[in-house]
Each structure stands twice: as structure tokens, then as C-alpha cells.
Image (cartoon, rainbow, N blue to C red):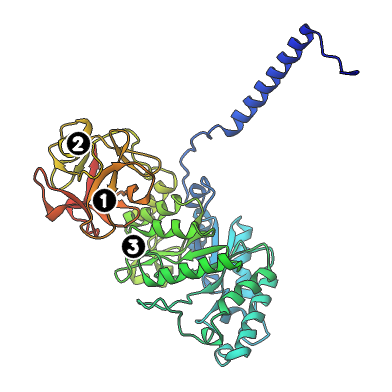
Amino acid sequence: MGLYALPRPDMRRKVRGLLLALVAGVLGVVAALVAPPPAHAAESTLGAAAAQSGRYFGTAIAAGRLGDATYTSIANREFNSVTAENEMKIDALQPQRGQFNFTAGDRVYNWAVQNGKQVRGHTLAWHSQQPGWMQSLSGSALRQAMIDHINGVMGHYKGKIAQWDVVNEAFADGSSGARRDSNLQRTGNDWIEVAFRTARAADPAAKLCYNDYNVENWTWAKTQAMYNMVRDFKQRGVPIDCVGFQSHFNSGSPYHSNFRTTLQNFAALGVDVAVTELDIQGASATTYANVVNDCLAVARCLGVTVWGVRDSDSWRASDTPLLFNNDGSKKPAYTSVLNALNGGTSTPPADGGQIKGAGSGRCLDVPGAGTADGTQVQLWDCNGNTNQQWTYTDAGELRVYGNKCLDAAGTGNGAKVQIYSCWGADNQKWRLNSDGSIVGVQSGLCLDAVGNGTANGTLIQLYSCSNGSNQRWTRT
């Protein structure tokens, strides 16, 4: 042992006691650090409520409306993020080649930062709103003009913009999944990659986003094409940090309950996601809450931006699509969004309970109290027995008997809904929506009583959501 003698037994006990006390103290500190935070008090504005979860709730601002006291009062009070509606687009910032004009863009930017808000940049490369001089270019000259524009704009705002929509709307509408035919696309299929690489070099601190519309529905060809591009970029090291979903929902492009699946799938590629230009025809309170809850359910969702303050400020004013009326008063949709951001409508009860059909008054039931995998569930008179007690878990499962999950046997209309041993797959995860629908995460289809049936023994399937009474459920 040399000079390192062991301490006497009583000394060892003292040392051990000190060590145990020290460990206990450290563990106490660690426990304090990792203990769940206390519940937040409900916030009274959209931005403050969103900030509770580390997100923003923003709006598009027009420089020409900053002299409107009602407009600025609402915008300053409610939102903690700003996107310039038109002032940072190509024609506004570079009306003549090589001659940048940042007056209007800086006015929006300065108003935002003076009022403590972050700024999203929109947009650097786009087939639309190009100045005439850019529209007249093609080939390598146009490609160089795009690069010069990105460098000029990002150089001016370097270190100041939280996110940039680097490229906007590069995919075609419809079922082709093709790139949009534009003057930029005709410079070569790599133009989007070049734009992102240029942007990264110009401002390494900014999040670089791709932004598009009609890409919220996971099943659409345009969505899949965008997904494939992002996946390819991530695999090859092209610098893309986020994807923006414009979310202009209307009768021609309605909200679909699989939007959350879309956000989750893109986030799984290793990019952030954001709702960037939200407006909803008619301002449905339910749909607004659904969109916000979709963002809240995805850890990498940065936040939500609505495209304007009041209906009168909207590019689609006749659709009355925003959270505030023309006079600045709050709509029911405002309250539904605020409640969702405050956590008031996003979490169903965690304990077991019955699930009752709105149309039938009968309960979701495992026939004969069976436990075999593959047993298709049905409607039956509510009786409170264990085969009708469903627990909604944090993972989005609906469990019965503690270890069997409500399970979709397929993803198409008519797919059997059964019980199966829980194993964590998306076909065993469900969304319980505020409109009473129960939607499969994997399929985006609704829990449905076959043939609008209401009788004992009516089987349960998946089917396209229609808001019928055979697809609406209550937990009791």
C-alpha cells in the first residue's frame, strides 16, 4: 500500500456518511432540476400562450397598415412573431437589378423588433412576384441573378432573421408530383439546392425553410414530392432546416385530419416544421383548434403564423378566414385557439371510460368480452363492463383490459377495427378530436359504425371522415 494507508474504521464510517450525504444532496438537486414544472396559469394572449411551450404565434404584417392604430394594437398585443406580407419579396427588395430597396422591409422589421417580436423572412426565391427585369432573364443569367439576390438580402439582414423561406412554391398542383414549370425551374433541376447552399453561406445562423401550399394532406402527390425532396436533401447534406406549410384551408383544399401525420413525418426526417400562412375559410373554431393542436403535438413544430390580423386585412377577405372581425373584435375561433395553446382542449381524460356513439347511444364494445388478437369491435348497449372501458394513453393508444389496443387492420375505407396486443405502431394510435371524431394516425380515416348502423352488434371500421353521427363519439 506504500504511503497510502487505509483510514481507521471510525474514519471510514465518517467518510462514508459524508459521501452519502453528498450523494443525497446531489440527487436532491438533480431531482429538483428534472421535476416537472408547475402548471402554467392560462395566458390571455396568443403569443404568450404559445410561448409556454416554446413556440410562437405570429401574423403577417403589411407596412402600409402600421399607421392603423387598431391594427397595430391587436398585432402588438397578440403575436410574438412577424412575417412581412409582401415587403421582403423579390419585387419589393430589388425593383431594379443590383439596386436594393429595403425601406418597406426595414419598416416591418423595425416595428417587430421594437415590440419584442421575432421575424420570419419571406421569401428569397420564387417564380411569382419577380420584378420585370428578372422575368426577362433565363438560363445562367437568371441563376446568377437568384444567387445575387439571396446574397444581397441575407447580407442586409444577417443575424437578424430567425427563419427564411428560401424557396417558395416550387411544386406543381395536381396529381403529377412534378416540379412547377417556371423560369427558375428551367435553369436546371438543381436550382433549389443552389438556393439553399447560397443561403447557408450568406447567413449561417438563420433557419432555412422550404415553403409551399396544398401540402398539408399526407396522401397528396404534391406532399409526397416535397417529402422526397427534403429526404434527399437531408441524405446528401443540402442545408435545409425547416419546412413551412402555408395552410390556406378552404372548400377546394380543406383541412384533413392527417395533417398531424404530415407534420410528424417531415419532422422525422430531421427538420423543423411550421404553419406559416394559416387562414381558414369561414374561420371554423374547430378547425383552427385542430391545426394548433397538430402543431402542439409535434415537438419540432416551431409555431403558427396566421396570414393577416383582421378579416379586412386578409388577401381573401370575402372568406372571413382570420381570428378577428373587421372591427377588431375576437371571433369564436380566437377563443378556441387560445384555449388550445393554454392546453385546455388538447388532452382527453387519462382514466378508463366508455366511448359512446353519438348516433346510436351505444358503446364501443369487445364482443363477448373476448381477448383474442383480431377481435373486431362493435356497438353494444352500454353496461360499464371491462370490455367497454377504454383508456387513452399519452402515446395516443386506446387500451382495453390494460394490454390490448384498438387497432386498425388496414388503412383503406372498410378496414377492420379490432383489438390487438399493444406494440406501439401508428395503426394503434388515435386522435380524439373536439368535433367528436376519432381518427387513425396512420390512415387519417375515422372510426365509423358500418352502414350508419345503430343496433347491437354493428361492426366498427375505418372510413373517410364525413362528420356523420356514426363517426362522432363521446367519452363517459
Q: How much space separates mark 1 and mark 3, taking CA atoms?
A: 14 Å
Residue under label 1:
437
**In the rendered image, which quarter contains the N terminus?**
top right
Secondary structure beneath label 2: loop
Q: Nearer the viewer, mark 2 or mark 3?
A: 2
| Residue bearing the label numbered 2 | 370
Q: CA distance from mark 2 to mark 1?
A: 25 Å
- Inspect the image, locate mark 3, and give the three-letter code of the amino acid beneath it: Tyr
Disc 3 packing (10 Å; few <14; some 14–19; many ≥20): many
Residue 328 visible to the viewer: yes
Q: Amino acid at mark 1?
A: Ser
Which is more N-terminal, label 1 or label 2? 2
Residue closest to the eye, 93 or 459: 459
Q: Is residue 157 left or right of residue 311?
A: right
Q: Quadrant of the C terminus?
A: top left
Task: Answer yes or no: is residue 121 visible.
Answer: no
- From the image, state whether disc 2 or disc 1 is nearer to you: 2
Q: Quadrant of residue 373?
A: top left
